[in-house]
Image: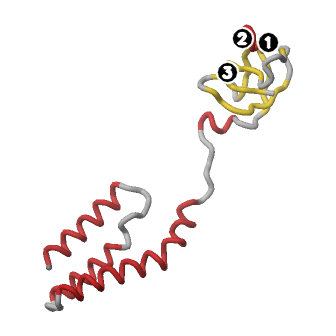
Amino acid sequence: MLYVWIAVLVLAVVLEAVTSDLVAIWFFPAALVSLVLSLFEVPWWVQILLFVVVGLLLVIATRPLCRRLLAGKAVKTNAESLIGKVCIVTEEIRNIDEVGEVKVGGLCWSARSQDPTRVIAVGEQVTILEIQGVKLIVS
């Protein structure tokens, strides 16, 4: 069973290294306990039982804490960070003609009005509601 526990240890480390969701970290100490038991020639069924018990206890005891610590605050990046910002119309927005442009953060974006019948004049301030492809939807 010694080689089985070494394989489980290696598998747990590799699995944890290739994922970022803490899926196998709890089974490393459990396999380590079973590995030590195998060195003392404890029966195989006791090794497996302790592996399962230690692994489950670690999951139950620490998973909620780990989830809370890893969750943190989601930081909006790139285009997502534009939603909710106010920008200036640089080219009249007319959905019917599929034209319109706004400037936000020093960059010009194609824009469409949330209300398809509304024409928004140059110089008006609008708020970005969402992003559809490369176009900002504004109101």
Amino acid type of the residue that numbered disc 1 sits on in the rendered structure: Glu
Q: Mark 3 points at which residue?
A: 109
Question: How dense is the environment of label 2, judged by Cα within 10 Å: few (below 14), some, or many (20 and up)?
Answer: some
Mark 3 and mark 1 in contact (Cβ < 8 Å)? no
Question: How dense is the environment of label 3, judged by Cα within 10 Å: few (below 14), some, or many (20 and up)?
Answer: some
* Quarter holding residue 88: top right
N-terminal label among 1 and 3: 1
What residue is shown at x 36% (from left), y 78% (from top)? Answer: 55
Mark 1 and mark 2 in contact (Cβ < 8 Å)? yes
What residue is shown at x 42% (from left), y 64% (from top)? Answer: 22
- Label 1: which secondary element: strand
What residue is shown at x 44% (from left), y 59% (from top)? Answer: 21
Mark 3 and mark 2 in contact (Cβ < 8 Å)? no
Is 55 on the left or on the right of 101, as rendered? left
Q: Mark 1 points at which residue?
A: 92
Foreground residue, 75 or 56? 56
Q: How far apart are marks 2 and 3 (CA)?
A: 11 Å
Foreground residue, 76 or 15? 15
What residue is shown at x 54% (from left), y 71% (from top)? Answer: 64
Q: Quarter of the image containing the N terminus?
A: bottom left
* Quarter holding residue 132: top right
Amino acid type of the residue that numbered disc 3 sits on in the rendered structure: Trp
**Image position of 39 with respect to 27: above or below:** below
